[in-house]
Amino acid sequence: MEIIIQATPEAAADVAARIVARQLREKPACVLGLATGITPLLLYQKLIALHLDWSGVTTFNLDEYIGLPRGHPQSYHTFMWENLFKHVNIVAENVHIPDGNAQNIPESCATYEARIHSAGGIDLQVLGIGTDGHIGFNEPTSSLASRTRIKTLTPRTRQDNARYFGSEEDVPHHVVTMGIGTIMEAKQNLLLATGQHKAHAIAEAVEGPVTSMNPASILQLHPRVKVTLDEAAASGLQRAEYYRWVYDHKPDWQAL
Ligand code: PGA
């Protein structure tokens, strides 16, 4: 894991935007995995401002609520179109978001996996992290080998997400999420976390044991992971000084 600590959420998002932009420039027909939530918003704003060419890009989102109409203000379909897709030249057919309204959800999950596979797999997966360590909506004790499927949100995640819905009661209980096994097959993972409320989950994910109690900790077993953090999210790390030194002394050949 490469841990990149920046002074502010803005600077952390800048680094993440450079990593994504580089992927798009190096492989214009790349496959991106995308995340929702407050954390990637800054990243998406920066990507929009870079005026990159998205015409060849295919995207797969991590997750979606079950039962919210597509056009609901809190659906991840709405989130992605409002905050990224409508501002770039992506081709609508190349956008994939799990369908939380499918008649047969298990079948649509299997189709989602097959589409990722036939697109050639995900080149770069953007991830956020829950305060409980979830990635996608893979809550603690999710199978570390799981594939795209239905999950039930924990009370903590429903509390965390109540801020978007206005009240906790309105947050759906069920979601469709890529599995941890799906995320682990991405060629590269980029986890972005900001804020003090993420410090504990990040410390466990980066420096704790690999355990389904903190699903993000599985990323320790992935060969190519970058974790971009602001100071607050990095504040629980024991080896922060070391990570800073590594990043500040990167030889040219090892550039981002
Ligand atoms: P947040 O969500 O960016 O809104 O904090 C992160 C997540 O739950 O993955």
Image: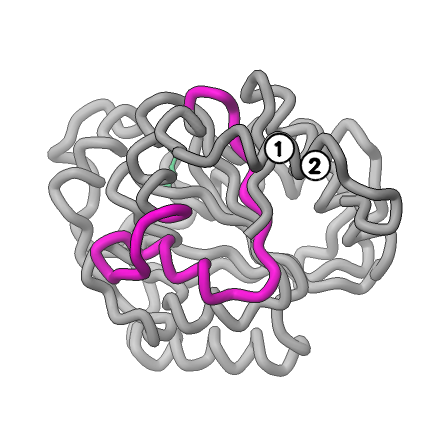
Report the span colored magenta: 205-232
Q: Earlier in the sequence, mark 1 or mark 2?
A: 2
Q: Amino acid at mark 1?
A: Leu
Q: Which quadrant of the view contains residue 73? A: top left
- Residue 17's mark? 2
Q: In the rendered structure, does residue 209 fall within the stretch colored magenta?
A: yes
Provide the residue designation for mark 1. Answer: 43
Q: Residue at x 51, y 56 (%)?
A: 61
Q: Residue 124's x, y, as percent?
A: 64, 58
Residue nearest the observer in this picture, 3 or 113? 3
Q: In the rendered structure, does residue 148 fall within the stretch colored magenta?
A: no
Is label 2 in a helix, a strand or a loop?
helix
Q: Amino acid at mark 2?
A: Ala
Q: On screen, 62 above or below 85?
A: below
- Which quarter holds ligand 1? top left
Answer yes or no: is residue 105 visible: yes
Q: Residue at x 54, y 43 (%)?
A: 227
Q: Residues within 10 Å of mark 1 (few under 14, many from 20)?
A: many
Q: Residue at x 39, y 43 (%)?
A: 129
Q: Residues within 10 Å of mark 2 (few under 14, many from 20)?
A: many
Q: Residue 234's x, y, as percent?
A: 44, 29
Q: Residue at x 81, y 45 (%)?
A: 255
Residue nearest the observer in this picture, 175 or 123? 123
Q: Residue furthest top?
A: 8
Is label 1 in a helix, a strand or a loop?
helix
